[in-house]
Image (cartoon, rainbow, N blue to C red):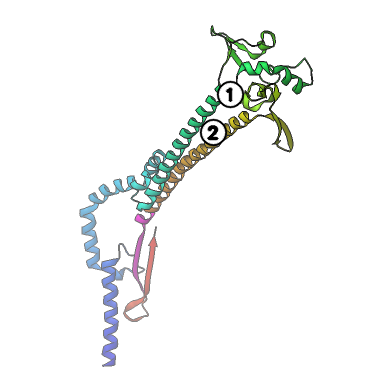
Amino acid sequence: MPVFYSGFRKIATLVIFLLGNFLLADGLFHYDERFTSAIHANFMQTFNSQDVADDNAEQAPEEIISFPARPMLMSLLLPGLGQFYNKAPWWKTTLFAGIEVAGFVGWWSLNKKADDIQLEYEEFANVHWSVKDWVANSSAMNEYLFDSDTSYSVYTSTHAIMLMDSSGNFMSSAVLTNIGYDPFIHPVRDRDFFENIGKYDQFVGGWDDAYINGVANWIETEKQVGDSTEIILMTDNKSEYLDLRNENNDLLKIAGYATTVIMFNHVLSAIEAVYSAQSNARKRSTDANVGLLFDRRSNYGIGGIEISVRF
C-alpha cells in the first residue's frame, strides 16, 4: 500500500506538471524535446496558422496605443488628456486637469484684481498729482534737492516726463524751466509717468499734500537698497499711491507664479503620459513561461521546474 501510494503520488505530480505545461505555458522552453506535448504542439500549430492574420492585425493598433508621442502631445496641449488616453487611474487625470483649471482661474483672477488696482492708483494719481503743484513747489524743492545749484532742475534732473499741449504736440518736461505752468499743457499719463511720480524725489512736489498753506508737509524716510540706505521724500498721498502700486506688483508677481505652475503642469503631465505609455507597453510584452527540466537519472526523467520571464 505505501509503495502504491508513493507511485500514485509521483504519477499525480507528473500529470499536474504536464497539465500545467499544456494549459499555462505559451511557447515553453525545454531542455529536452521529449517533454514537448504532442497535443499541445498540434494545438498551438493549428491555433497559430489560423490566427496569424488576426495577430498581425491586432499588433498594429497595439503599437499605436503604446507609442508615447500621442499621449505626450495630448498632455502638452491639455494636461490630463494624455492620462485619459492611456486609461490611467482617474486620479491622475483629475490631478493634472485640476491643477490646470486652478492655475488658469488663479492667473485670471489675480490679473483681474491687479488691473482693478491699477485703475485705482492711476485715478488716485490723476486726482492728487498735477503739473500745477509741481511748478508751484519747484523752487523750494529744487533748493532742497540740489542745494541751490542752478545747474540742476526738478524738471530734468534724473528723469523727465512727457507733456502734451492742447494741439496734441509732445514736449519734454524740461520746457517748464522756461515757460513755467501752462494750464493747456498736461502730462502724458503713460507707464513711465505713473512710475516716475512715485519713484523719484524730483516729482514729490507735484503731490497736492507736499505743501499745505506754504508749509512743507513731506518727510524723509529710509529705504534699504542692497547694502546701503537711501533717503527718499514721502507724503501721505504718495505713500498711499505707492502702497497701491506695490499691491498691484505683488499680484502680478503671484500671477506669474501661477503661469509657471501651469507651464510645469503641462510638462509633468507629458512626462508622466510618456512614462505610463512605455510602462504599459512593457507590461503587455511580458511573457512568463513554465517548463520541466529533463534529468535522465531521476524518476520519470523530471529534474526540476524552470520558470522564465521575458520582458
The circle drawn on residue 174 is none
Residue 217 drawn above or below residue 23 = above
Span shown in magenta:
282-294
Asked whether residue 108 appears in the rendered view, the answer is: yes
Residue at horizontal 37%, vertical 42%? Answer: 70
Q: Do the residues labelled 2 and 1 touch (CB within 8 Å)?
A: no
Observer-nearest residue: 102 or 298?
Answer: 102
Q: Tell me: 295 left or right of 128.
A: left
Observer-nearest residue: 101 or 251?
Answer: 251
Image location (x, y in percent) of residue 237: 61, 29
Image quadrant in which the C terminus is located: bottom left
Of marks 2 and 1, the one in the foreground:
1
The quadrant holding residue 127 is top right
Which residue lies under the disc numbered 1?
128
Asked whether residue 29 appears in the rendered view, the answer is: no
Image location (x, y in percent) of residue 216: 70, 25
Residue at horizontal 30%, vertical 65%? Answer: 25
Instruction: Please identify the residue farthest to the front as the structure is shown.
Output: 213
The quadrant holding residue 302 is bottom left
Instruction: Please identify the residue farthest to the bottom as the structure is shown.
Output: 1
Identity, as a three-letter code, of the amino acid under mark 2: Asn
- Was residue 285 drawn as part of the magenta stretch in this picture? yes
Q: Tell me: 79 left or right of 264.
A: left
Crowding at dot 2, Cα within 10 Å, few <14 / some 14-19 / many 20+, comes out as many
Which residue lies under the disc numbered 2?
248
Residue at horizontal 55%, vertical 26%? Answer: 124
Observer-nearest residue: 53 or 234?
Answer: 234
Identity, as a three-letter code, of the amino acid under mark 1: His
Residue 86 drawn above or below residue 222 = below
- Was residue 267 drawn as part of the magenta stretch in this picture? no
Image location (x, y in percent) of residue 81: 36, 43
> Which secondary structure lies at badge 2?
helix
